[in-house]
Image (tube, grey):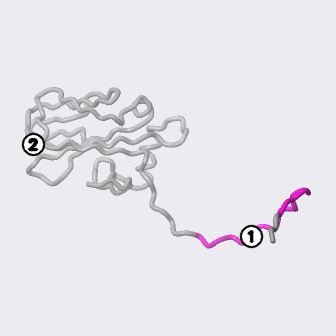
Amino acid sequence: MLLAACSDGEDGAVGPQGEQGIQGEPGEDGNANVRSYLFENQTLVDGNTLFTIPAITQDIMDYGVVLGYFQTSSEDFWYALPYRSTQDFHVFIYSIALQQLTIRSTVAASDVDFRFVVIEGTDGSASKVTSVEQELKQAGVDISDFYQVADYYRLTY
């Protein structure tokens, strides 16, 4: 015996809404708008040193934030840029261009590690840079402390 179902009529009315399901576990916050770049064992010259950082786009230059940190091979602590010591050792971000960042130093050094954290501006606020800095400040994050920034954005050290 062969059974076939066909409908020549209109669809029936929509049924009642089902019960709400149970709430799922909260997921981890993402950090898709943050990139971290590590450059190990760099030689720092007395003058300018250029780094290629693909995440530095026009949007980052216009609205984002680039944070810089360094450490020497003999230390296990990240110093924020700009850095100024009492021995006339100065290191700072000199310029930012598309996919490039230039560090200027007053001394030469070897075996220096650099980290750069590139943060996109947040939602359509008038000043995205201000909103990123305010967000971090309101969250109690000291941007001169790499570990606080990394913990906030869930970056690996």
Residue 77 percent across, percent down from the top left: 18, 53
Q: Secondary structure at mark 1?
A: loop
> What secondary structure predominates along the stretch shown in magenta?
loop
Residue 64 percent across, percent down from the top left: 41, 37
User: At x 11% / y 40%, what residue is drawn?
Assistant: 86
Residue 69 percent across, percent down from the top left: 24, 44
Residue nearest the observer in this picture, 13 or 132: 13
Q: Is residue 11 magenta?
A: yes
In the image, is 128 to the left or to the right of 83?
A: right
Quadrant where the C terminus is found in the figure: bottom left
Residue 87 percent across, percent down from the top left: 8, 38
Q: Is residue 98 above or below residue 86?
A: above
- Residue wearing tag 2: 111
Q: Residue 62 occupies which quadrant of the picture?
A: top left
Q: Is residue 46 above or below residue 9?
A: above
User: At x 45% / y 46%, what residue is drawn?
Assistant: 134
Extent of the magenta region? 5-23
- Residue wearing tag 1: 18
Q: Secondary structure at mark 2?
A: strand
User: At x 27% / y 31%, what residue is drawn?
Assistant: 101
